[in-house]
């Protein structure tokens, strides 16, 4: 293993709840087992971990769930994260249903950016894939976030036989609204089946056919692995997050903290380090956290037969 500084692990996704108000079919379908509330970390316990993480150079945080906005006090937690001495950036990923009502408090808390998950622009398809979500509320939240000046991105997962005819529509939305829309390849986690997804190379061919002026965009648009393309002179961009067909492990800068206090060095593997037993001892917590970071593998093993890949649902490991 390379050490933490060489790997430049500076980003942590923090799941604050496994609950969600949606039942997306590839993430948290009906019947998904829930964690007991007493097993979920308190906000203060999460902050203890983040203080130790900051001393190790982890200074950027993404607040996730489940759906983070269903947990009471999420807005205040964002503020507390921002107030930690080592914090550089705090962002949020959300399905968007509750975002508009929370937006003023999140802005006041200092939220730096928001990612909104949106797999379709058709209301009937949206209700189906989310188990009853309201596309109009998410579109209103997107418009409010953009109008507020908050850095806003949309995450979209294209699936065969469902929304494959909407690729160009999402690109048009990106350029119209001046935002980044990122297409994420389906990963074999939980109910996700890559056979139902698309290679982003195929999507890029479609995008360049629809927009012949599309060119690579080197603008830094966040902390993640997306490769961006834009039309010179326009503010919007499309991004490709290609976990399977464009392995970016060598530049991966992140770890994941579950709502129960388990730190996952890599999304792909079952391996996780339980931090909860060390919360009472700051030095032991820091040592355990360092150990977890150093266990980060050189690359994922998606598609490798017999590999110890993650078997839990995406909602159970931090979205």
Image (tube, helix red, strand yellow):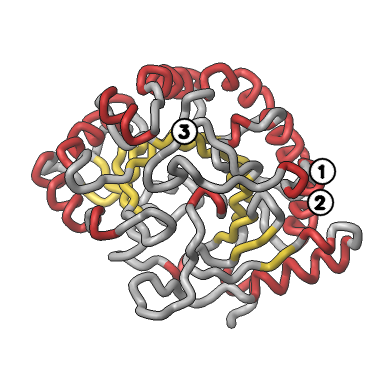
Q: Position of residue 147 (x, y in %)?
A: 45, 18
> How far apart are the two marked residues, 2 and 1, measured between alpha carbons?
6 Å
- Displayed quadrant of residue 141: top left
> How far apart are the two marked residues, 2 and 3, measured between alpha carbons?
30 Å
Q: Quick one: label 2 or label 3, which is nearer the N terminus?
A: 3
- Displayed quadrant of residue 4: bottom right
Name the secondary structure under disc 2.
Answer: helix
The residue indicated by pointer 2 is: 48
Residue at the (87%, 66%) spot, across then down: 283
Relative to 73, does residue 24 appear above or below in the rendering?
below
Residue sitting nearer the eye, 86 or 199? 199
The residue indicated by pointer 3 is: 22
Q: Dot 2, crowdedness within 10 Å: few (<14), some or many (≥20)?
A: some
The residue indicated by pointer 1 is: 44
Q: Which mark is residue 230?
A: none
| Left or right placement of residue 155 versus residue 58 in this view | left
Q: Position of residue 86 (x, y in %)?
A: 75, 50
User: Can the viewer see residue 227 in this picture?
Assistant: no
Q: Position of residue 14 (x, y in %)?
A: 63, 48
């Amino acid at each position: 293993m390379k050490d933490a500084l060489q790997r430049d692990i500076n980003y942590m996704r923090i799941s604050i709840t496994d609950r969600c108000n949606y039942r997306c079919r590839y993430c948290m379908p009906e019947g998904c087992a829930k964690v007991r509330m007493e097993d979920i970390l308190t906000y203060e316990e999460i902050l203890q971990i983040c203080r130790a993480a900051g001393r190790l150079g982890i200074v950027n945080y993404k607040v996730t769930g489940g759906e983070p906005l269903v947990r009471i006090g999420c807005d205040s937690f964002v503020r507390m994260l921002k107030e930690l001495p080592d914090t550089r950036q705090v962002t949020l990923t959300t399905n968007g249903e509750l975002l508009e009502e929370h937006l003023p408090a999140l802005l006041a808390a200092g939220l730096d950016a928001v990612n909104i998950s949106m797999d379709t622009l058709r209301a009937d398809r949206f209700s189906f894939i989310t188990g009853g979500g309201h596309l109009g509320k998410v579109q209103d939240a997107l418009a409010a976030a953009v109008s507020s000046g908050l850095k806003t991105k949309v995450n979209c997962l294209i699936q065969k036989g469902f929304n494959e005819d909407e690729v160009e529509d999402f690109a048009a939305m990106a350029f119209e609204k001046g935002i980044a829309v990122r297409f994420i390849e389906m990963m074999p986690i939980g109910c996700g089946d890559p056979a139902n997804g698309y290679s982003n190379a195929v999507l890029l061919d479609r995008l360049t056919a629809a927009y012949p002026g599309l060119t690579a965009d080197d603008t830094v648009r966040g902390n993640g692995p997306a490769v961006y393309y834009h039309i010179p002179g326009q503010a919007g961009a499309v991004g490709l997050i290609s976990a399977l067909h464009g392995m970016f492990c060598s530049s991966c800068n992140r770890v994941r903290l579950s709502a129960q206090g388990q730190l996952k060095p890599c999304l792909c593997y079952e391996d996780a380090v339980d931090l909860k037993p060390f919360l009472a001892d700051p030095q032991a917590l820091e040592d355990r956290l360092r150990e977890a970071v150093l266990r980060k593998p050189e690359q994922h093993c998606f598609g490798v037969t017999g590999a110890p890949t993650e078997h839990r649902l995406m909602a159970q490991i931090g979205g």
